[in-house]
Amino acid sequence: MDNWDEIRTAYQVARLGTVSGAAEVLGVHHATVIRHIDALEKRLGVKLFQRHTRGYTATEAGQDLLRVAQATDDQFSQLSARIKGRGNEVSGELVVTTIGGLSQLLVPILAGFQAEYPDVQLRYLTSMRLFRLEYGEAHVAIRAGSPPQQPDNVVQPFLTLKSAIYGSREYIDRYGMPDIPNRMAGHRFVGLDDQASRAPFAQWMRETVPAHQVVFRSGDTRAVRQAVLSGVGMGFLGTYERTDGGDLVEVHPPLEEWESRLWLVTHMDLHRTTKVQAFLKYLKDHTEHLRDEVV
Amino acid sequence: MDNWDEIRTAYQVARLGTVSGAAEVLGVHHATVIRHIDALEKRLGVKLFQRHTRGYTATEAGQDLLRVAQATDDQFSQLSARIKGRGNEVSGELVVTTIGGLSQLLVPILAGFQAEYPDVQLRYLTSMRLFRLEYGEAHVAIRAGSPPQQPDNVVQPFLTLKSAIYGSREYIDRYGMPDIPNRMAGHRFVGLDDQASRAPFAQWMRETVPAHQVVFRSGDTRAVRQAVLSGVGMGFLGTYERTDGGDLVEVHPPLEEWESRLWLVTHMDLHRTTKVQAFLKYLKDHTEHLRDEVV
DNA sequence: TTTTGCCATTGCATTTCCGCACGGAAACCG
DNA sequence: CGGTTTCCGTGCGGAAATGCAATGGCAAAA
């Protein structure tokens, strides 16, 4: 049963009883309607209508088709309404994927967004592997580094994370303030676990700090921060983390080369949807102060 | 939501995940599939798929469509099977319309037909008004008189009903054998109630027998027969009725001008169906002896 | 890393489909 | 009873949908 349009045509004829009426409803010429009916009947090998001078009367087969197609028409109308509506409402799942270590910054914002749009179910993914927007695994991705070049993605700048080297007051009191990068001998560092990390400051650290001086490594930035706070050693922390309580001393101010540019990435096909737009707007509105600060 | 074919296309893409696969299943070119999807999405204003190099992945809207269209496809398949099958099976309603007075001949045949095809529901209509085949009011009509000329009807000769004048033995004993049409004075007749009846013998009677000699009229041929049997008067009876028990005397043998030609009429659109064909065959097979007899 | 295969996309040629107009027939209406 | 309306049926020219083939991109295999 291919060619669903012919069924639709036959449905209108069965419903209205005339070819002309069906043609008007369908917005086509009545000749087209006749041809559709003829083709459909030929393919089925059964007459759907009896032709007479006042119109078409459905045979038993035609009445059967009428019932089925009526239901189909209803279904499609509802489907259309749902789909069209869904484009303009903020509901359903919203999947956000990001690099690790931004939870502290993002989760409160996500919570606020969810409060504003209660119909949204949020999924916040910070997996090791890169979630792929093109397969629909996420609606919005936050990526770091150089601007992603995927062709089907819409990329826009998000934040520039400034990092500085911090140490705990306790550590400074004990080991003195290091003169970076000139005289760091005898000092201890806390760093990222990922040896291949492409974070700018991680690269700097690999090049500048001898490996044996990095006495604590972790993939979790909160663990890194905790380690610095505990006086294990100095380490890079995002400047946005500084405001959190804790007795931290800035050992070296932020350098431009340590900055990590963040990008908001969405798939082209989803970027225009109201849901994604609403989220992006909310996200930008609630990170404004950070952007001002770091620019 | 017009253009159901595009929904069908989108359905296959959602089901198979690739444009190429859908194109193969649908028996069209890739390009056509892409254009269908693009058009549908444009009309809905919502993306149904996310495009990537390995194929198309359905968005939430696309998955919704998938579910609905899946059900539709099932429905249409079943519909098609029903319709195609119905063309080749003998079931459902079968409406036969006929002139009055053939019940005695036809009903036993109808009963036999129904016994042979138990899935058939018979309707046997002998209404005053002419049921119109072209509006689908009946599958088969039995008409009398000159061959019907309706353009969309399939007409074939059925039987030739021979009529003769009968009287009861009692009547003949009392009034003597009349010499028809020469000396009928003093005789009594039983006739049809319908003054305008176009039955040949009714016409003959109107012209030949003075109205006051027709002492019993009825529209029901069985009543007429009963009246003749009861000795009310002479009357026309079909020769096929003669075999029935009863003490009848043929007052005048059948004349050609009294014959009533019967026609089997079907509407073109229904004539080819197995159901109608089966009925016509059964009808002919079981009236063969009558045909032989009257020719 | 190179190769191979699969897949979407796009411009161009073609065919199919559609709209138009005319004809004809039946019913409706004063 | 004749004019009028409302249908359906069909040949023909044009337009829209389709098929074709070339292109490019990505990923898995070699």
Image (tube, coloured by chain):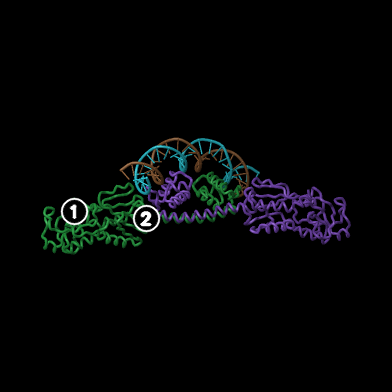
Chain colours: A green, B purple, C brown, D cyan
So how many labels did they put on this image?
A: 2
Between B268 and A249, which is closer to the camera in this rendering?
A249
Classify residue D9 by image quadrant: top right
Secondary structure under badge 2? helix
Residue B210 seen in this snapshot: yes
Please report, as a chain letter, where disc 1 is located: A
Residue type at numbered disc 2:
Asn
- Which numbered disc, 1 or 2, marks the residue that appears first in the sequence? 2
Q: Between residues A221 and A265, which one lies in front from this camera angle?
A: A221
How far apart in space, not on screen, are marks 1 and 2 (Cα)?
A: 47 Å
Task: Give percent across and percent down for residue A215.
Answer: 18, 59
Q: Position of residue A26 (x, y in %)?
A: 50, 48
Which mark is drawn over residue A252? none
Q: Amino acid at mark 1?
A: Met
Query: Residue placed at 10% from the left, 60% from the top?
Result: A176
Q: What secondary structure is marked by label 1?
A: helix
Within 10 Å of disc 2 (Cα), the crowding (few <14, some 14-19, many 20+) is: few
Regarding residue A295, the answer to whether it shows in the image is no
Please name which of the two marks, 1 or 2, marks the residue nearer to the observer: 1
Image mark 2: chain: A
Contact check, label 1 and label 2, Cβ < 8 Å:
no
Which mark, residue A88?
2
Q: Residue B142, position in %: x, y? A: 70, 52
Q: Nearer the viewer, residue B35 or B259?
A: B35
In percent of width and height, residue A134 lies at 35, 51
Q: Does label 2 lie on the same chain as label 1?
A: yes
Q: Residues within 10 Å of mark 1 (few under 14, many from 20)?
A: some
Q: In the figure, is residue B12 to the left or right of A173?
A: right
Name the residue carrying label 1.
Answer: A205
Taking the spot 81% from the left edge, 49% from the top edge, the residue there is: B255
